[in-house]
Amino acid sequence: MFVSLLENYPVFADLATAVLTPIEQGAAAGVTSTLTLTELLTGPVQAANLTALRDYELHLTNFPHLTLHACDADVARQVALVRAATGLRTPDAIRIATVALAGATLIVGNDKAWQGKTGSLALLLLNEFV
């Protein structure tokens, strides 16, 4: 979602803005894994674009009302439970486990493989709005 917004990906930029604006304004709280930061920074690193690397990191780490959670032992245990129950790939299970442990009620994604596999989290799939 952040990649769509920061790189102005035409299909999802408006949807990402619609999801992130309430978080930025404090109407909702957001949570994500530091895995999001890893994925967000990969493109600038591959392109050797140090300016984008710094800008993206600053944007995500300073985004208002958004908490970045590291993968600690509690998250790792929950990831294992999610993977065992769902068969999802580790990155997907990290996202779901992190958000669930933070007490969120909704997870936003774009992978239909998550349907029926997010436990008590409601799932909002961006591609359903395109």
Image: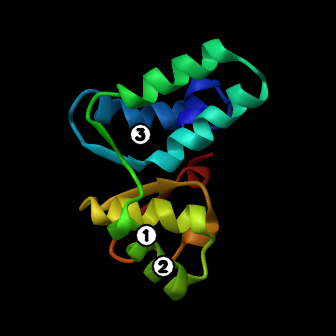
Gap between marks 3 and 2 measured at Cα:
28 Å
Gap between marks 3 and 1 measured at Cα:
27 Å
Q: Secondary structure at mark 1?
A: helix
Q: Secondary structure at mark 2?
A: helix
What residue did someone put label 1 on? Answer: 76
Q: Badge 3: few (under 14), some or many (20 or more) residues near its Cα, within 10 Å?
A: some
- Name the side, left or right, on which 100 lies relative to 6: left
Q: Badge 2: few (under 14), some or many (20 or more) residues near its Cα, within 10 Å?
A: some
- Name the side, left or right, on which 60 lies relative to 110: left
Q: Look at 25% across and 27% down and name the residue there.
A: 25
Q: What numbered label is drawn on residue 80?
A: 2
- Tell me the amino acid under the disc marked 2: Ala
Residue 53 in sight here: yes
Which residue ends up furthest to the top in the rendered image?
51
Q: Badge 1: few (under 14), some or many (20 or more) residues near its Cα, within 10 Å?
A: some
Tell us which disc is closer to us: 3 or 2: 2
- Tell me the amino acid under the disc marked 1: Ala
What residue did someone put label 3 on? Answer: 19
Q: Look at 53% across and 86% down and name the residue there.
A: 84
Residue 121 position in % (x across, y down)? 35, 68
Tell us which disc is closer to us: 3 or 1: 1
Please state which of residues 62 and 25 is positioned toward the viewer in this rendering: 62
Looking at marks 3 and 1 on the same chain, the residue that comes earlier in the sequence is marked by: 3
Gap between marks 2 and 1 measured at Cα:
6 Å
Name the quadrant containing residue 76: bottom left
Relative to 50, is 32 above or below? Answer: below
Q: Look at 60% across and 22% down and name the residue there.
A: 53
Q: What numbered label is drawn on residue 58?
A: none
